[in-house]
């Protein structure tokens, strides 16, 4: 039933966390498939028309575009180029971290898991947020002041929450997510309901911040026994899917800003994710539930029910949800309909592969004669 656990050696994960692990891997795999497909079809390529005479000869004869990026007056174009270079590179690194974190968790190596999620959640995701907020501002910071791309430069928790609210406005929805809770989970050392403390403890034998200070006669996470592992698993799988969902909508938005994805495909992916979120929620221990998570799940359930009814299908049962998260099928949708939809995706992919051969480089300059 759980593809993320099938035929995997060395699994020590208790069964009660299977839905959380599967949901986390589903979100990881969706982003990975997006990245791989985009690279295969050159979706991250960008075409730039050059009007500046001083750079025409240089760009016609050089593979190094750094000089143009640093000096061009066409800042909108250089920002677009930097986005298409930086975004996939950062995304790839994030996905490697998430994959290894989930795999080490499956094997019971939770200290490693918490070490690995810190950078993508606190730093890499912050960088992607900067691109969403303003390509121009991101480009200027990358070129002139890297310190401003560090998450600490944003200010406190309220400022992080304000930035996230701006992102929701740009994207057009908050998807039931809470900006203050996202900020808390990523950056709040003083809260027990935050990754920041446990991630820091996983990285350091001794921590001195008053909120996470190592007790005397102890070493951070070195002496964990099975009961501590259970607590660490329970926290990881009750919170990480929430932040992975947020990461996914950021990644989806940035990808769509480069090349538009079909709405039919986006809806199918969201059906799969929403179905698994509902199943995951029912398996979380009540101790780890809260109003923020409940609102998030309720939003997905309401969207899914309305989406199914709008398309002429019934509200899904538990059995429907299990099938849905595996293949995106509507409740009681016939196999021929599912097959036709998959064939349409394959046709689009083949067309994109054919188009890709015309873009040999990540950045394709077209020199425009001003005369």
Image (cartoon, rainbow, N blue to C red):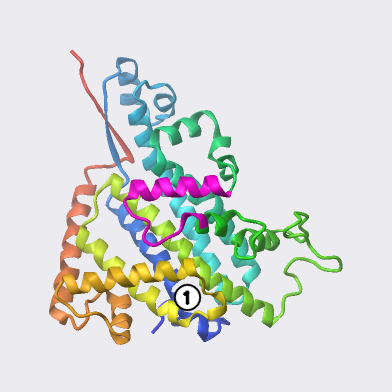
> Is residue 189 shown above or below 145?
below
Residue 166: x, y in percent? 41, 45
Q: Taking the image as drawn, is residue 271 in sight? A: no
* Residue at the outermost top position: 371
The residue at the point 22 percent across, 81 percent down is 331
> Is residue 358 shown above or below 195?
above
Q: Is residue 66 magenta?
A: no
Say whether residue 115 is left or right of residue 138: right
In terms of image quadrants, where is residue 1? bottom left
The magenta segment:
157-180
Residue 57: x, y in percent? 31, 19
Say whether residue 22 is left or right of residue 190: left
* Residue at the outermost front position: 291
Residue 361: x, y in percent? 32, 40
In terms of image quadrants, where is residue 323? bottom left
Q: Is residue 171 magenta?
A: yes
Q: Determine whether the residue tagged by mark 1 lies in a helix, strand or loop.
A: helix
In terms of image quadrants, where is residue 46? top left
**Crowd tier of the residue under label 1, counting other residues whose Cα lies within 10 Å: few below 14, some 14–19, many 20 or above:** many
Q: Taking the image as drawn, is residue 68 in sight? A: yes
Closest to the observer, 330 or 56: 330
The residue at the point 56 percent across, 70 percent down is 236
The residue at the point 38 percent across, 60 percent down is 31
Say whether residue 36 is left or right of residue 228: left
Closest to the observer, 106 or 265: 265
Q: Which residue is mark 1?
A: 20
Residue 102: x, y in percent? 52, 69
Q: Which quarter of the rendering shows the C terminus?
A: top left
Predominant SS along the magenta part: helix
Closest to the observer, 166 or 90: 166
The residue at the point 41 percent across, 66 percent down is 296
């Amino acid at each position: 039933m759980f593809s993320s656990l099938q035929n995997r050696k060395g699994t020590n994960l208790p069964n009660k966390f299977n839905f959380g692990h599967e949901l986390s891997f589903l979100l990881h795999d969706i982003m990975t498939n997006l990245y791989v497909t985009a690279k295969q079809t050159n979706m991250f390529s960008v075409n730039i028309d050059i009007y500046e005479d001083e750079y025409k000869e240089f760009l016609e004869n050089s593979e190094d575009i750094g000089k143009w990026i640093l000096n061009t007056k066409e800042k909108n174009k250089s920002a677009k180029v930097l986005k298409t270079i930086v975004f996939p590179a950062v995304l790839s690194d994030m996905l490697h971290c998430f994959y290894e974190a989930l795999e080490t968790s499956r094997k019971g190596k939770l200290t490693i898991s918490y070490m690995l999620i810190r950078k993508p959640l606190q730093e890499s995701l912050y960088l992607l947020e900067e691109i969403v907020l303003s390509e121009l501002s991101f480009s200027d910071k990358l070129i002139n002041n890297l310190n401003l791309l560090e998450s600490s430069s944003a200010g406190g928790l309220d400022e992080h929450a304000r930035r996230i609210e701006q992102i929701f406005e740009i994207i057009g929805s908050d998807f039931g997510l809470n900006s203050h809770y996202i900020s808390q989970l990523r950056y709040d050392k003083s809260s027990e309901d935050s990754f920041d403390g446990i991630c820091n403890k996983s990285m350091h034998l001794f921590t001195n911040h008053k909120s996470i200070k190592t007790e005397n006669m102890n070493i951070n996470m070195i002496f964990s026994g099975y009961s501590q592992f259970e607590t660490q698993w329970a926290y990881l799988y009750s919170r990480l899917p929430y932040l992975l969902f947020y990461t996914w909508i950021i990644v989806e938005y940035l990808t769509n800003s480069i090349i538009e994805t079909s709405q039919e495909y986006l809806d199918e992916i969201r059906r799969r994710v929403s179905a698994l979120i509902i199943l995951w929620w029912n398996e979380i221990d009540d101790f780890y539930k809260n109003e923020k998570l409940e609102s998030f799940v309720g939003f997905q359930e309401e969207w899914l029910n309305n989406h199914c009814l709008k398309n002429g299908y019934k509200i899904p049962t538990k059995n429907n949800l299990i099938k849905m998260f595996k293949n995106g099928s509507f409740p009681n949708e016939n196999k021929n309909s599912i097959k036709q939809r998959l064939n349409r995706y394959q046709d689009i992919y083949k067309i994109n592969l054919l188009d890709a051969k015309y873009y040999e480089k990540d950045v394709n300059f077209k020199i425009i004669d001003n005369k």
